Image (spheres, grey):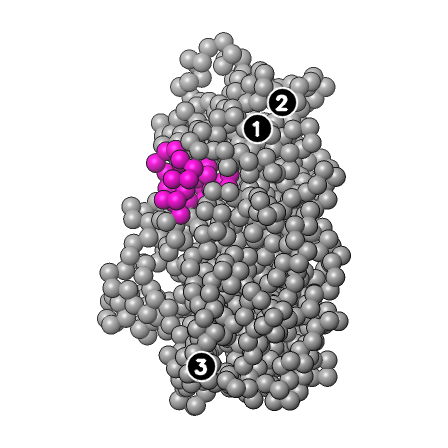
């Protein structure tokens, strides 16, 4: 291919003398090792030069550049068959960068003239030549330019892409970036003259970029990295197929068979009764029980006939030694335990049972929580005619050996009650933050357990006759053709993966969910980011003085490792490009603006990756998302899919009536104090009634055949919930001052 004379001239000048170019151009290093593997950072990361003959990530020398304790990172990278679809890249530079020349926000990233972008350079790809928006940040103490896809931009699997840094990026002294001599040489080679792997990889990619008219000409490319994305997400449908080869599960509702878990039944006609267990909840001015787990009198239950806990048997693929999902020498998944026992709780409504049985909603619980959390919203869904069922996730609740010796609620019954008694942070679930392959596979096994729960619902062996007497005489039956999902926080995270991977789930309501658990959620959470940063420094010996945010090399690397167990890898396959041929589900995402636990950046990433619309009225528009007026119905052909904003609200949205505000809103990673604390934390009342009504309508209309999403509590800019809009509030962070 004919190259511009200017690029050839730069190459010649650099080769002869750096002096004439140094005044005008800052060179981006591109130092490919002549023998062996190129050390990390000597060329931009990631690169297919680090893939072995089998397409797997090989040994990466010099990871100590960003982590003095990098063995776990290397082990995680070696488990991959390519690089992250949403994690980004790293360019190590000798000169500090002027951040005004970078795409630092979504608006600049989506501009056609953005100085940095991603692009499909795979000749066999149906998306060949497609550009993807990217953000960038310079990390001065590491001398690193970090580039990430705009949160929610997810690259296709198994496809070659490039991250392109153009010469529109400038150093602090005003010089434009320019290519290293070796990259300039490769750029000027005709395709027929490229003989080495390096020449073919980068030269062919530059040809693709120029052909796509992504740059005016090749000399606008200051640097690039070329990499193939992982296909790790394709493993989960294969695991589901293997799981379904096992015998049908059956439920154990007696103490002997449910052990080591507690079997317990509480109903309208049992002793102790459901009221003896759950207490006498407070009611509103109309005499209706308040929903929510924080009701001081007890848990609402006037629409529930029976709640029972027990266990069932399901296959586990987690190796007993490594806690990884392993393959044998032939590439088949190894079944570690065909008879792993999982605790389960089921809730049956009082309403008349349809002929086919009750439609059933699977509940996904939050981090540090357990299946008992579904009691917070079960009554309102029971009133709408839905049964609910839930399990404890891997290493949560009873599966973390939490005892069950007492009544966890407000009734006079002493216990045990089938629900774990404590709510510790599940450090073992995160493998002590030391082995992120284990973290990935704990997420994956949790989804597999919920697939087994679906099998239980559909099992010909499912026998709920032990509940008949407690329920008032009738044996409950579940409608296996109408299975839905509702989950909050971690339950919303798991739910987004379940919607992509389990075709039997017809609709899902995800409350305060998010994606990119390592790269976006933990690093941007006002509640946990400080702790996570401290742990990461100790575990990985993080180099440099940069904060651990989504741009940090450690977050980038760990994000790639965990991606196969993260919603970001599956969200694009819920409404389009299904992984298993499933029909589109109905999807409702609700989230609280200024969520202090699960940051909005991660929720936006999820809903953008799903391709949802944003229901209006809303407060905050999201770039590259379409606003659609509520009520929303059939906006995805025969399906309904939209996100709804709540304000004032916080992370307990949908589960509690009140939540505490502790941090000022709109914190940024560039602020001197990243998450400024509120001097006097306060409780904000959340629209739990309206949220419950929204869920009931969504599921009821989905069951009827045409899901509808209402905006039941239009969001308002009243951060402290005192009735005074923030713009006119003398003290917007103090509900006692308007």
Q: Position of residue 654 (x, y in %)?
A: 47, 71
**Could you say which disc has been placed on residue 198 in the image?**
2
Residue at the spot x=44%, y=81% of the render? 413
- Residue 569, above or below 383: above
Q: Is residue 176 magenta?
A: no
Residue at the spot x=73%, y=44% of the render? 332
User: Considering depth in this image, is 112 or 666 the residue closer to the camera?
Assistant: 666
Q: Position of residue 700 (x, y in %)?
A: 62, 78
Q: Residue furthest top?
A: 16
> Could you tell me how far apart the alpha carbons at marks 2 and 1 are, in whole angstroms?
18 Å
> Which residue is disc 1 drawn over?
59
> Which residue is disc 3 drawn over?
413
> Could you tell me how far apart the alpha carbons at marks 1 and 3 are, in whole angstroms?
59 Å
Specify whether residue 449 is in view. Answer: yes
The quarter of the picture where the N terminus appears is top right
705 with respect to 375 (left or right): right
Other residues around mark 2 within 10 Å, as few (<14) / some (14–19) / many (≥20): some
Q: Is residue 557 magenta?
A: yes
What range is drawn magenta here?
A: 532-559
Quadrant position of residue 723: bottom left
**Could you say which disc has been placed on residue 286 in the image?**
none
Nearer to us: label 1 or label 3: 3
């Amino acid at each position: 291919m004919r190259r511009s004379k200017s690029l050839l001239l730069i190459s010649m000048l650099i080769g002869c003398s750096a002096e004439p170019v140094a005044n005008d151009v800052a060179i981006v290093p591109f130092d490919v090792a002549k023998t062996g593997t190129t050390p990390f950072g000597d060329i931009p990361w990631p690169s297919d030069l680090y893939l072995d003959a089998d397409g797997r990530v090989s040994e990466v020398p010099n990871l100590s550049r960003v982590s003095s304790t990098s063995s776990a990172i290397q082990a995680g990278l070696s488990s991959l068959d390519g690089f992250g679809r949403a994690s980004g890249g790293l360019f190590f530079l000798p000169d500090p960068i002027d951040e005004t020349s970078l795409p630092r926000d979504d608006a600049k990233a989506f501009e056609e003239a953005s100085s940095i972008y991603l692009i499909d350079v795979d000749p066999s790809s149906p998306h060949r030549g497609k550009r993807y928006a990217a953000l960038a940040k310079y990390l001065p103490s590491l001398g690193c330019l970090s580039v990430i896809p705009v949160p929610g931009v997810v690259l296709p699997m198994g496809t070659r892409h490039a991250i392109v840094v153009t010469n529109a990026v400038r150093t602090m002294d005003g010089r434009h970036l320019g290519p290293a001599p070796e990259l300039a040489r490769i750029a000027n080679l005709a395709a027929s003259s490229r003989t080495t792997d390096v020449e073919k990889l980068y030269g062919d990619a530059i040809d693709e970029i120029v052909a796509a008219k992504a740059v005016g000409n090749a000399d606008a490319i200051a640097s690039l990295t070329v990499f193939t994305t992982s296909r790790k997400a394709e493993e989960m449908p294969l695991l589901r197929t293997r799981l379904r080869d096992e015998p049908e599960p059956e439920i154990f509702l007696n103490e002997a068979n449910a052990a080591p878990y507690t079997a317990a039944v509480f109903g309208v006609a049992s002793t102790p009764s459901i009221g003896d267990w759950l207490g006498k909840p407070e009611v509103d001015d109309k005499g209706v029980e308040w929903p929510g787990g924080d009701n001081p009198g007890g848990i609402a239950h006037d629409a529930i006939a029976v709640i029972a806990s027990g266990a069932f048997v399901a296959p586990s693929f987690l190796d007993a030694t490594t806690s990884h999902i392993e393959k044998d020498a032939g590439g088949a998944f190894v079944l570690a335990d065909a008879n792993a026992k999982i605790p389960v709780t089921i809730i049956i409504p009082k309403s008349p049972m349809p002929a086919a049985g009750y439609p059933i909603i699977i509940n996904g619980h939050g981090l540090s929580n357990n299946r008992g959390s579904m009691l917070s919203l079960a009554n309102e869904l029971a009133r709408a005619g839905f049964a609910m069922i839930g399990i404890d996730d891997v290493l949560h609740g009873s599966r973390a050996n939490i005892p069950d010796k007492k009544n966890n609620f407000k009734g006079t019954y002493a216990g045990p009650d089938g629900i774990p008694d404590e709510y510790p942070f599940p450090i073992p679930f995160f493998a002590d933050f030391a082995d992120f392959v284990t973290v990935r596979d704990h997420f994956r096994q949790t989804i597999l357990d919920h697939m087994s729960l679906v099998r239980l619902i559909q099992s010909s062996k499912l026998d709920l006759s032990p509940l008949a007497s407690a329920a008032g005489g009738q044996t409950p039956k579940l409608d296996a053709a109408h299975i839905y999902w509702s989950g909050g926080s971690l339950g919303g995270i798991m739910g987004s993966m379940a919607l992509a991977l389990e075709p039997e789930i017809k609709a899902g309501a995800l409350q305060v969910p998010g994606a990119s658990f390592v790269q976006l959620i933990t690093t941007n959470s006002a509640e946990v980011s400080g702790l996570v940063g401290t742990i990461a420094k100790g575990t990985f010996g993080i180099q440099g003085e940069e904060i651990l945010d989504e741009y940090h090399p450690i977050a980038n690397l760990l994000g790639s490792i965990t991606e196969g167990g993260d919603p970001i890898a599956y969200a694009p396959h819920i409404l389009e490009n299904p992984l298993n041929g499933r029909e589109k589900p109905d999807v409702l995402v609700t989230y609280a603006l200024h969520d202090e636990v699960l940051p909005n950046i991660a929720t936006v990433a999820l809903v953008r990756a799903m391709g949802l619309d944003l229901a209006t009225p809303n407060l905050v528009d999201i770039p590259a998302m379409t606003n659609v007026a509520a009520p929303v119905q059939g906006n995805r052909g025969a399906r309904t899919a939209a996100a709804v904003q709540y304000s004032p609200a916080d992370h307990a949205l949908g589960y509690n009536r009140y939540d505490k505000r502790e941090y000022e809103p709109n914190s940024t990673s560039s602020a001197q104090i990243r998450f400024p604390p509120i001097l006097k934390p306060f409780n904000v009342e959340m629209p739990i009634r309206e949220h419950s009504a929204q869920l009931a309508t969504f599921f009821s209309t989905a069951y009827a055949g045409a899901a509808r999403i209402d905006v039941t509590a239009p969001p308002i800019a009243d951060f402290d919930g005192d009735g005074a809009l923030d713009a006119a509030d003398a003290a917007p962070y103090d509900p006692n001052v308007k």
